[in-house]
Image (spheres, helix red, strand yellow):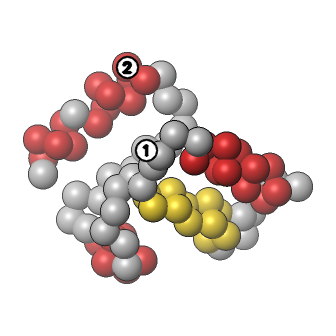
Amino acid sequence: TQRQLAKVKPMVETKGWEYTILSDANNILGNLLNFQTIPQTFLLNKKGEIVFTHSGYVPGDEYELEEKIKSVSK
């Protein structure tokens, strides 16, 4: 909803996140890529291909993502 989206920017600023946050208010991307869970993480290679996806979040997931980023950036 618009009310939920309005909360995103303040949360990003509070957390100090320096990466791109995209929203899918009309669920267009969610429908195209067939996902419902948020957060949803996509890692793309230099060609723009999706090489890793992850649904949801539990503490420690960031370590797996960090390793995937390192392997893709080689």
Residue 40 can be seen, yes or no: yes
Q: Which residue is mark 1?
A: 21
Q: Identify the residue at horizontal 32%, vertical 28% (top origin).
A: 11
Instruction: Find the residue positioned furthest to the front.
Output: 59
Packing grade of label 2 (10 A; few <14, some 14-19, many >=20) is few
Q: Identify the residue at horizontal 63%, vertical 66% (top origin).
A: 52
SS for dot 1 = loop
Q: Position of residue 4 (x, y in %)?
A: 17, 43
Circles 2 and 1, Cβ within 8 Å, touching? The answer is no
Question: Viewed as shown, does residue 43 lie left or right of 5?
Answer: right
Residue 46, image quadrant? bottom right
Q: How many marks?
A: 2
SS for dot 2 = helix
Does 12 appear above or below 45? above
Packing grade of label 1 (10 A; few <14, some 14-19, many >=20) is few
Q: Identify the residue at horizontal 48%, vertical 22% (top origin).
A: 16
Question: Viewed as shown, does residue 61 lie left or right of 39?
Answer: right
Q: Position of residue 25 (x, y in %)?
A: 22, 58
Q: Amino acid at mark 2?
A: Thr
Q: Position of residue 3 (x, y in %)?
A: 11, 41
Residue 24, image quadrant? bottom left
Sequence-first disc among 2 and 1: 2
Q: Amino acid at mark 1?
A: Ile
Does 2 appear above or below 16? below
Question: Viewed as shown, does residue 19 lie left or right of 55?
Answer: right
Disc number placed over residue 14 in the picture, else none: 2
Disc number placed over residue 73 in the picture, else none: none
| Of residues 67 and 51, the one drawn nearer to the viewer in this rendering | 67
